[in-house]
Amino acid sequence: MHTEAIDAMPQFERLVHEHAAEMFRAACHYAGDVDAGADLLQDVTIKALVRREQLAAMADARPWFRRVLRNQSIDEHRRRSREVTGRLEPGAEFEPGLADLPAPWQNVHEAVDPVAEAERLHLLDKVADALAELGEDLRRVIVLADIDGASMHELVEELEVPVGTVKSRLHRARARLRQALTAPRQAA
């Protein structure tokens, strides 16, 4: 092992630790569940380990992590879509995701108001449905900006489009979500 590689290890560990929570959230979002998200993040961490010297030299490695995470998730999605077995049939139930897990600060043994919990779950379903209805470009920009908290500069780098395009996509995505979330309930 090269001396530079050994010197880069503590920096690499700090870098991974610094971005771990955000990247795990994004990985779970891309993958659709916690286990697949953990696998996705592990693959990205291995790629980062191989490039640890390059990452240690970067002023901000966050865009690199996001880009590699997105590309890895696309590769994984393509690989899975080529598999014949394990596909969900139309109308099949989607497994619960991160939104269904208690927040770390919540005591899972606390008494829960069933009406409030039902309303919360209904709102989460409504938000998930509204996000699913957005096109990929609009969904990506709103998730990166409003869920991951990316800055405008980070959005431009991640999406590889001009700032005006980012702003217009973000405006359209928010408008469509607002419309979907404020539309009156339809009878089932």
Image: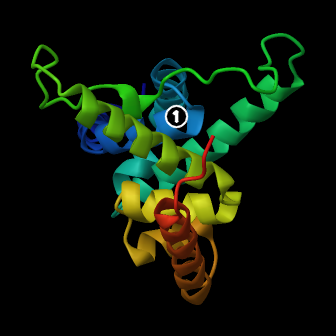
In depth, the one of 171 and 38 nearer the eye is: 171
Mark 1 belongs to which amino acid? Val
From the viewer's perspective, tell me whether residue 99 is left or right of residue 171.
left
Task: Please state, as top left, top right, bottom left or bottom right, where the N terminus lies in the image.
Answer: top left
Q: Is residue 3 visible?
A: no
- In this rendering, does residue 37 appear at all? yes
Which residue is at a point 41% across and 46% down the rendered structure image? 123
Q: Residue at x 11, y 22 (%)?
A: 107
Which residue was labeled with disc 1? 44
> Residue pushed farthest front?
187
* Residue 17 higher or lower than 171, as above or below: above
Vertical position of residue 97 compared to residue 135: above or below: above
Horizontal and vertical percent for residue 69? 55, 43
SS of the residue at dot 1?
helix
Kindly identify the residue that appears in the image at 52 percent across and 80 percent down.
171
Q: Residue furthest bottom?
A: 164
Where residue 30 sits, quadrant-wise, is top right
4 shown above or below 152: above
Q: Residues within 10 Å of mark 1 (few under 14, many from 20)?
A: many
Residue at 22 percent across and 32 percent down: it is 103
* Rendering coords of residue 138 (x, y %): 62, 65
State the image coordinates of residue 188 (x, y, percent, origin top left). 63, 40
Residue 88 position, x and y percent, is 77, 20
The image quarter containing residue 148 is bottom left
Q: Residue furthest top?
A: 85
